[in-house]
Amino acid sequence: VFWTFMAGGFAGMANWAAMMPIDTVKSKLQVAPEGKYSGVMAVAKDIMAKDGVRGYYKGLAPVMVRAFPANAACFLGYEMAAKALTRAGLE
């Protein structure tokens, strides 16, 4: 159980570390006033010009704090449910 929990937590953190730049671009585009950006690439270029690569990872710490327990619980829940269904013969 412990290792399943840890695997889920670290998998969630790895996922967010990889996806954070895409999520940052999406979020900036969503909250921008109508017409500010011509598209996704315009947002990405704006972030790079203003903040460099670090700009894509703003807010990473709270995302990681949330990602570990949320994904660990989800992973553990899935594994426990799968084992329970297998034991019940409902594979």
Image (tube, grey):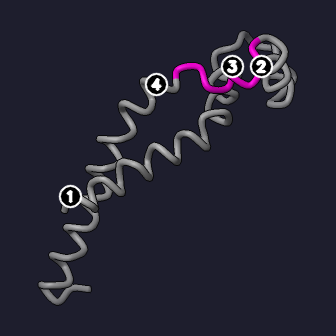
Q: Is residue 54 magenta?
A: yes
Instruction: Tell me the element at label 4.
Output: helix
Percent coordinates x, y for residue 10 in the rendering: 41, 49
Q: What residue type is disc 1 on? A: Phe
User: Which residues fall within the magenta stretch?
Assistant: 51-59
Horizontal placement of 78 versus 43: left or right? Answer: left
Q: Are marks 3 and 2 in contact (CB under 8 Å)?
A: yes
Which residue position holds label 1? Answer: 2
Which residue position holds label 2? Answer: 52
Q: Are marks 1 and 3 in contact (CB under 8 Å)?
A: no
Q: Are marks 1 and 4 in contact (CB under 8 Å)?
A: no
Q: Residue at x 74, y 14 (%)?
A: 51
Q: Quadrant of the C terminus?
A: bottom left
Instruction: Tell me the element at label 1.
Output: helix
Say which mark, if any, is on residue 55: 3
The answer for how far apart the CA atoms under marks 4 and 3 are is 13 Å
Q: What residue type is disc 3 on? A: Gly
Which residue position holds label 4? Answer: 61
Percent coordinates x, y for residue 65 in the rendering: 37, 30
Instruction: Tell me the element at label 2.
Output: loop
Q: Image quarter for residue 66?
A: top left
- Nearest the viewer among 62 and 32 is 62
- At label 1, counting other C-alpha atoms closer than 10 Å, the crowd grade (few under 14, some 14-19, many 20 or more) is few
Q: Earlier in the sequence, mark 1 or mark 3?
A: 1
Q: Residue at x 84, y 15 (%)?
A: 49
Q: Image quarter for residue 30?
A: top right
Q: Earlier in the sequence, mark 4 or mark 3?
A: 3
Q: Earlier in the sequence, mark 1 or mark 4?
A: 1
